[in-house]
Amino acid sequence: MSFHILSEGTGPSALVPTDLSRIPVSLISVHTDCVNRRVEGRVVHKGPLVSAVQDFILKAVIEEKDSSPHVSSQNNSINVFLLGALAKKFSQDVNQGDMILVSGFTVEKSPTASKDRLHPCNLLLSGDSACIYVFREQPSPDPSSLVPSKRSSTLEVSKAAKAPKYTYVQLGDLKAGSVVNVYGVVVFFKQPFRSRGTDFCSSLKITDQSKQRTICTIFCDNREKHPQIYQAGDIVRLHRVKAQLFDGSINLVNTFGFSALTFDGAVGGAVEPRTSSQSFHFDEEDKRTVEELRSWAAGQVLFPQNSASIPLSAVQPKTYFNLTCQLLAKAPVDSTCTLLKVWDGTRCPHTLLNAVVEPAVTEGPTSFSKNKENFIANVLVFDNHTEMARQLKPGAFLRINNLQATSGSSKVLGLASSQSEGDHLAFYLHGGTSYGRGIGVLPENSAPIQELKRVLDSFPVDVGVEELNDSDLLEVWGTPPESLESDCSHHIKLVPLSELKQSNPDQMHNVRVQLRSYQPRRLYQALKLFCRKCTSIQEIPDDELVADVFSEASKRSESCTPPWWALRGNVNLPGDSPDRTLSIYLPTHLVTEGKTKELLFLMGSTLEETCRLAASYQNVVPVTSSGGHLAPLDSSAPFLFTGRKRYYGCKRCSEAAIRNPSPDGLGVFNAKTLAEAFSVQLLEFVLLMKLEVQDATDTLEVLIWKDAELFLGVSAEDIAVNQEAQNHMCQTMDSLCPPESRTGRGPWLDLCLKTFRGKDDGGQDQNYYHVCNAPIIKNSST
DNA sequence: GTTTAGGGTTGG
């Protein structure tokens, strides 16, 4: 790799490689032989430097001076992707408007050509052969970095090399009819709502140092394109809005080419633009403008106190308020009303309405621990807001504006309450958009949600997850399900083992026993994979087999055209093999958002390399190629690595394919969302053990499965990755079955056992015994 | 090359 800056009027032309033959941008195709070729053009767009493990990525667009009138201008502009150190140098030293010469590039098909209307190919610059020369009229601010040079004879440097410059109008200077760019502090806003036309409409009132308050009405066909206002005090930058006179005052409406950036309004905070725009201009001057607006606003009273959101603990009856909260569950009540169960980690001092709804129509948990129940607020959402409510996913973080706290007996049609009539606070989001009524989904990384999460994270975790029921278990052992009373309890009479053995199947018994031995002795072998769909229990593929799958896949892997939603790049492996470079694919939207650690598709790696990379990414999906497309590995291999965790799919129930994944309601990718996107039936870790127990009368082999986790006090998933959990499991088993004793010096255990009929290996009917709730440990015996 | 809304509370 090499990188040179030449300024006008100086420098040895010897530095410029004259042996490279120039290829016009318009003639570049994927079949172009790129050896000893050069491309020249002006940088018309310079993207942000994006870091991905050890590799940086930067996207730029260069435009070649129109060489022939027959060439359409769209073929004169081409995307250039720079990787590694070159991307970093480019980011530091190249400005929009510079002329550059590149060589040592490769050409690939541009997956975004139809969208960005640029050249059908991309140039890729990475590795040793890649080379960039930068020609600039003005000397660089740092003269020491310049090569003394005279103007190169191989290039013409045009005079007009200015990046587009935006000017901003103060709100006090708006003239009706003009299309302008403005900055302003948000003093009031309405979340996007469906208009009677084709678009969503949002409304904001902004102000600036001119003290003029201006209403902006934004029409966009989807919610994401609207300014992402989280709270009053946010700062917006609007490009291409039209000033209009209405009712004697000037307002602003978006017009063609509209784009919006929004910033948090807190003085001293990072100036980070939020936007759905793929590319936008943002420089030091913009940063200054935001900071000036912030400090100006800090000294003003711009909006009423109640514009802020208040915690549930501060809600007063008969008031309207704004709430920042997390959605826990939701259920439709009727065609005009939806119930949202939300919390913010604080407890409302007033008794809250406790709405009880049909579990069948509830999305999210249908019951909560008694303690948590006290923190949950029921929000009834009416009319136009139910459409938004329908799209919400439990877990999402919300900002609900203009909730009404109604005290007194509240009767909601079709909604049962577990409480007798009385004073209970109910929260209503009435229909309409007056006073900014509406629901907004806030991303997890937003300032209001970061604050909310600090409160929620300190809340004690609920115990008890959805568990497998007994019919699942019976199916696993191929036993026909029959009606079973599941009221296993430790209160029923103790039965000696000898008597138990004589009893009929499908019965529940309580026994008091000691643990004589258990299998597997190597406890990690107790770890299995369970498919909820086909209810099969499967072995975890061993590393040797998985390593083979990776090595086979690596042989088949060849660089392929990235799917439309992804970009291709390389990654240098950290550690001991500096020359090892692997192909990676990153979802484009993550790259443009700078979220390059969240999800990576990795090609051609070994198992060991995949594990190493998984340490620095949140989600690593190993891929190979098939017919020029990304494809998953054989399903014996984990389809996903997150940190030390590996996730497997069920061979029988998956139809795996690599597709564009969407994050969950919180904007994050996890095993569940990825499995869904790739049609992978996720396997769960479970523990399966055989215990040999004894009492004074007999010995018996029993199976323990779903309660093994309770028994051992660890989760199967933790056992899979966590040495501490494994140690804990060993210690527990040692204490229940002391290794020096084969005769029962361990504690007595009260177990509930269920008998069922199954087939043994030889196909013979046999009684099996299953531990069907968490054993109670009695005092140590002698 | 521009329809939609045009802040300000019925209440379930």
Image (tube, coloured by chain):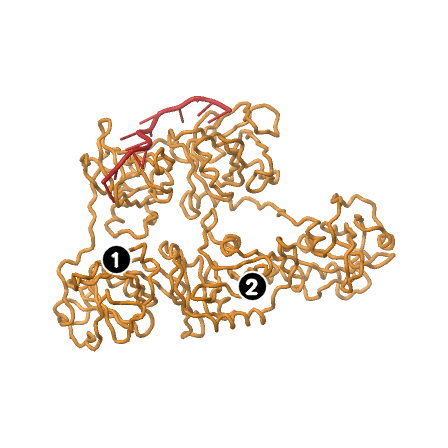
N-terminal label among 1 and 2: 1
Q: Given the image, what chain letter belongs to the residue carrying mark 1?
A: A
Q: Is residue A417 visible?
A: yes
Residue sitting at x 23%, y 50%:
A285
Number of residue marks: 2
For residue A108, side relative to residue A424 (left or right): left
Q: Given the image, what chain letter belongs to the residue carrying mark 2?
A: A
Q: Are marks 1 and 2 in contact (CB under 8 Å)?
A: no
Q: Name the image quarter holding the N terminus of chain A.
A: bottom left
In terms of image quadrants, where is residue A527?
Answer: bottom right
Q: Identify the residue at the far front of this view.
A: A70
Q: Position of residue A316 (x, y in %)?
A: 47, 28
Q: Residues within 10 Å of mark 2 (few under 14, many from 20)?
A: some
A23 is higher (above) or lower (below) than A600:
below
Q: Position of residue A350 (x, y in %)?
A: 53, 29
Residue sitting at x 35%, y 38%:
A199
- Regarding mark 1 in the picture, which secondary structure is present there? strand
Q: In the image, which disc is placed on residue A635? A: 2
Q: Position of residue A387 (x, y in %)?
A: 45, 36
- The red-coloured chain is labelled B
Residue that mark 1 sits on: A45
For residue A651, side relative to residue A188 (left or right): right
- Regarding mark 2 in the picture, which secondary structure is present there? loop
User: Looking at the image, which is closer to me, A625 or A710?
Assistant: A625
Q: In the image, which disc is placed on residue A15? A: none
Q: Amino acid at mark 1?
A: His
Q: Is residue A301 visible?
A: no
* Colour that chain A carries in the picture: orange
For residue A200, side relative to residue A383 (left or right): left
Q: Are marks 1 and 2 on the same chain?
A: yes
